[in-house]
Amino acid sequence: MQSKGKKAEYNKVIPFIPEGDFYYTKGVEAFKKRKFDIAIKWMKKAMEQKPKDPLYKCQLSIIYTEVGSYHKANQLLTEVLQSSDYIDCYYLIANNYAHLGLLYDARKYAQFYLDKEPDGDFSEDANRLLELIQIDKDIDDLDLEDEDELLIYQETAFYHMENSEWTKAIPIIEEMIDLFPDHILAKHEYAQAIFYTGKQNEAIKIEKDILEEDPNSLYSHMNLALFYYEQKNPAYEKHIQALLNIYPIHVQQKLRVAVTLARTGNSEEAYNRFKQLAKEPVKTHLSYYKWYSICAYNCGDPGKALDIWEEGCKKHPRLSDEEGPWNNK
């Protein structure tokens, strides 16, 4: 018969208090399964246990990058650099700046990384990033005082173009070109707007002239692919081939490539591109929901297509006036 003391000893509950590595492992597992909200919660718990561990902060920053929270990611990485010389942070910061379109800062931090770790784990990625920044000439470096005014024009033109209101977009874009003649993106928007109002030859000439001067012009390849496809001109295929080899670093460019591929019948490739996009930066785009839904349907996933379409209709009621993805094969 057990003694009373022995029985009490067996009945004791020993509390299990996980250390940071347990939470970190759970966070990585959730991240690999693309359950990002859960991964963030686990990683924050790991940081509570070991707030000075740079690895935990870096991993959380990578999750934030994946969901498009680039500023939060860089805030964590900057904290790491203030307390330790964790070299990988320089590349991770550069990558986030590139996604934000802050190409000067992206270039600076990528170079910092290569200067310190020329043969490091991210050296190939850093060199590739610098190459992409070098050929990305469609995003301008403007004076800060010009940015607000340009943004108003861009947002107004964007609204009209997203809603296919080409005649309303044209005077806005023309004024933008007059005020900001070095803002090359406005010329591409203008070419697209006049193409869809009947001036097709003029639009094609604009893009061919830009492409002759800059063979790496991403927007020229996208517009010419669309223009020639609309004209049933097989020349569009050459520009599609160029796009298939380009993976932009700027979120808006990523979306535009995906939409261009979708609109030219390349549903499978477009679908893969859409799936890699973080929703937060692009949810203001009606085109994101429309073409992502169409691609999902065309690739044999009607359930996902319907989910995307319904979400798009809630955020952009005008989308409900259009035919659903099942009528856009």
Image (tube, rainbow, N blue to C red):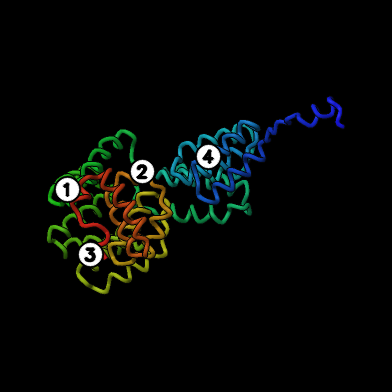
Indicate which disc residue 169 carries.
Answer: 1
Q: Quadrant of the C terminus?
A: bottom left
Kind of residue at badge 2 = Asp
The answer to which of 68 and 78 lies nearer the viewer is: 68
Kind of residue at badge 4 = Ile
Task: Determine the secondary structure under disc 1.
Answer: helix
Report the Cα–Cα distance between label 1 and label 3: 18 Å
The answer to which of 59 and 209 lies nearer the viewer is: 59
The residue that mark 3 highlights is 227
Report the Cα–Cα distance between label 3 and label 4: 43 Å
Report the Cα–Cα distance between label 2 and label 3: 29 Å
Query: Residue 227 at x, y = what percent?
Result: 23, 64
Kind of residue at badge 1 = Ala
Task: Determine the secondary structure under disc 2.
Answer: loop
Residue 205: image quadrant is bottom left
Kind of residue at badge 3 = Phe
The residue that mark 2 highlights is 141
Q: Residues within 10 Å of mark 2 (few under 14, many from 20)?
A: some
The mark that comes first in sequence, 2 or 1, is 2
The mark that comes first in sequence, 1 or 3, is 1
The mark that comes first in sequence, 2 or 4, is 4
The residue that mark 4 highlights is 40
The mark that comes first in sequence, 3 or 4, is 4
Q: Residues within 10 Å of mark 4 (few under 14, many from 20)?
A: many
Residue 269: image quadrant is bottom left
Question: Does residue 258 appear left or right of residue 65 in this picture?
Answer: left
Look at the numbered discs 2 and 4 and tell me whether their residues touch, using CB distance below 8 Å: no
Residue 257 visible, this angle: no
The mark that comes first in sequence, 4 or 1, is 4
- Mark toward the viewer: 4 or 1: 4
